[in-house]
Image: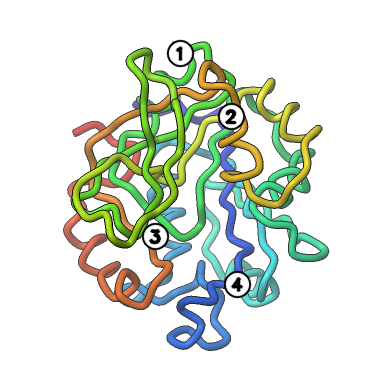
């Protein structure tokens, strides 16, 4: 769907410290984790460009100077990357609030900078717009949800509640895939809220009617642990298509 997402701004939340993989990465920021001869950030940007996006706001914090140096050596292409460096650790919600002036589209795509999912982005945006909800959250099923909080989706397709992760509760479940569509009303609501966590302090407090669940089947990975990071190269090698392309 070339051009479908050309006017949609995307935000990548990439300011976290990555404490669980600090022993592996050392002084390398998580978003620059090496994956198969390149970096997680470069793989993510390639996928966003393939989806038809033209403008990405990159929220940075911890080790931001290393990411800025990396971006300075990046070959120019159609995708414009606007870095926004938070003045102090603000959390995911705070980082998005701080970057708000850079966001012009309605809706806006918001992505966690440490996860990737095989999904067609234009379809996610389209379903969000048809839902009429203030915000939408991508949900995918994983075979073993012990590492993740579970998402309960109601019959009307809204997020009814979030269930805390339970290391003893093995088995498949829907999880938050770390990709959202925020309409202008949701962004305004976020701007008037407080709390550092986008998930706990904002999304979990929305009424079910305000938060739509976009449920998709697709491979998912996050690089938040040494074990998951070690599987990232195989994930990107085996992924059937870049995010955004039709199957």
- The number of callouts visible is 4
Q: Residues within 10 Å of mark 2 (few under 14, many from 20)?
A: many
Give me the C-alpha separation between circle 3 and circle 2.
Answer: 23 Å
* Residue 134 as seen in the image, left or right of residue 32: right
Q: Position of residue 180 (x, y in %)?
A: 50, 36
Q: Position of residue 149 (x, y in %)?
A: 40, 49
Q: How is the image coloured?
A: rainbow
Which residue lies at the image location 60% right of the left edge and 27% below the top edge? Answer: 206
Residue at the spot of label 2: 182
| Mark identifier at residue 43 | 3
| Mark identifier at residue 17 | 4
Q: Quadrant location of the C terminus? A: top left
Q: Earlier in the sequence, mark 3 or mark 2?
A: 3
Q: Earlier in the sequence, mark 3 or mark 4?
A: 4
Q: Earlier in the sequence, mark 1 or mark 2?
A: 1
The secondary structure type at the circle numbered 3 is helix
């Amino acid at each position: 769907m070339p051009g479908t997402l050309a006017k949609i701004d995307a935000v990548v939340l990439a300011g976290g410290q990555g404490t669980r993989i600090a022993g592996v990465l050392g002084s390398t920021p998580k978003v620059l984790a090496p994956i198969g001869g390149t970096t997680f950030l470069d793989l993510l940007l390639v996928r966003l460009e393939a989806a038809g996006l033209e403008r990405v706001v990159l929220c940075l914090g911890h080790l931001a100077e290393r990411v800025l140096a990396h971006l300075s050596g990046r070959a120019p292409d159609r995708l414009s990357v606007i870095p926004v460096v938070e003045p102090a650790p603000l959390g995911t919600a705070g980082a998005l609030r701080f970057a708000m002036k850079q966001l012009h589209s309605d809706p806006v795509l918001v992505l966690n900078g440490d996860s990737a999912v095989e999904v067609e982005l234009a379809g996610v945006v389209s379903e969000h717009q048809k839902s009429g909800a203030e915000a939408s959250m991508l949900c995918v099923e994983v075979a073993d949800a012990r590492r993740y909080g579970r998402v309960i989706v109601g019959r009307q397709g809204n997020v009814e509640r979030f269930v805390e992760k339970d290391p003893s509760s093995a088995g498949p479940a829907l999880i938050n895939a770390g990709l959202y569509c925020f309409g202008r009303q949701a962004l305004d609501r976020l701007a008037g809220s407080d709390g550092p966590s986008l998930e706990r302090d904002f999304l979990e407090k929305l009424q079910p009617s305000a938060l739509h669940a976009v449920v998709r089947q697709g491979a998912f990975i996050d690089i938040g642990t040494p074990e998951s990071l070690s599987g990232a190269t195989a994930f990107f090698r085996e992924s059937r298509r870049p995010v955004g392309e039709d199957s």
